[in-house]
Image: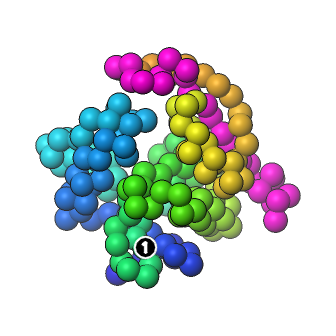
């Protein structure tokens, strides 16, 4: 398996057109989807026509994808994905960090391990100047990953939710890490 990034426990590789079933299984778990859409499974049609094309998109500034399938190095098990997506198609200066892992990966530090590795690669190899991440204010586990990955709380805001889900009334939070701050942490 060719990879984009490897850590002690993870291998991140580009998604391919045959990965729809992996994504469907991930997005069918109500707990995985709890803070995304209230826990509803994603339909096979939506995975094929919307989710997979978004994950396969190649960004001009890198000539590469920005969503990475995450596998456990030792067992080769699919765990989910990481996002390290330029906010501007033509510039890698600001990227959004995200992750969606299955429950078997939760509580093991894998999200933090993958996030830190992507941040390091972004600042050392990809020309990133600022990493941003956001989640629902009530998603304490995701917020903890952001903090452990070196990001700091930036702001609280209210997003435009197409449908209210449990916890959305508390709004969302944004975290960030700049290259200067990251260099100071090293």
For this rendering, which residue is in front, 48 or 88? Answer: 48
Counting every numbered tag in the picture gives 1
Disc 1 designates what residue?
Answer: 72
| Residue at 34 percent of width and 20 percent of height | 163
Q: Is residue 44 visible?
A: yes
Q: Position of residue 143 (x, y in %)?
A: 61, 42
**Quarter of the image where one finds residue 45:** top left
Q: Does the magenta portion include 86?
A: no
Q: Is residue 126 visible?
A: no
**Quarter of the image where one finds residue 7:** bottom right
Quarter of the figure with the C terminus? bottom right
Q: Position of residue 161 (x, y in %)?
A: 41, 21
Secondary structure of the residue carrying numbered label 1 = strand
| Residue at 52 percent of width and 75 percent of height | 9
Residue 128 vertical position relative to residue 176 in the rendered view, above or below: below
Callout 1 crowding tier (Cα within 10 Å): few <14, some 14–19, many ≥20:
some
For this rendering, which residue is in front, 141 or 94? Answer: 141
Residue 95 vertical position relative to residue 68 in the rendered view, above or below: above
Q: Position of residue 166 (x, y in %)?
A: 42, 24
Is 12 displayed left or right of 29 in the figure?
right
| Residue at 60 percent of width and 22 percent of height | 157
Q: Position of residue 183 (x, y in %)?
A: 81, 60
Is 95 displayed left or right of 99 in the figure?
right
Which residues are drawn in magenta? 163-186
């Amino acid at each position: 398996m060719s990879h984009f990034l490897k850590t002690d426990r993870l291998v991140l590789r580009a998604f391919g057109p045959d990965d729809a079933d992996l994504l469907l299984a991930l997005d069918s778990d109500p707990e995985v989807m709890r803070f995304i859409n209230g826990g509803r499974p994603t339909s096979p049609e939506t995975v094929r026509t919307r989710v997979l094309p978004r994950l396969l998109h190649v960004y001009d500034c890198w000539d590469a994808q920005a969503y990475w399938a995450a596998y456990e190095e030792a067992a080769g098990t699919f765990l989910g994905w990481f996002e390290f997506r330029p906010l501007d198609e033509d510039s890698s200066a600001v990227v959004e960090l995200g992750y969606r892992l299955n429950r078997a990966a939760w509580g093991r530090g894998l999200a933090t391990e993958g996030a830190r590795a992507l941040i390091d690669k972004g600042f050392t190899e990809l020309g990133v100047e600022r990493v941003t991440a956001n989640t629902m204010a009530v998603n304490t586990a995701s917020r903890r990953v952001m903090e452990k990955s070196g990001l700091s709380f930036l702001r609280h805001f209210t997003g435009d939710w197409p449908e209210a889900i449990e916890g959305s009334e508390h709004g969302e939070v944004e975290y960030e890490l700049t290259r200067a701050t990251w260099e100071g942490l090293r």
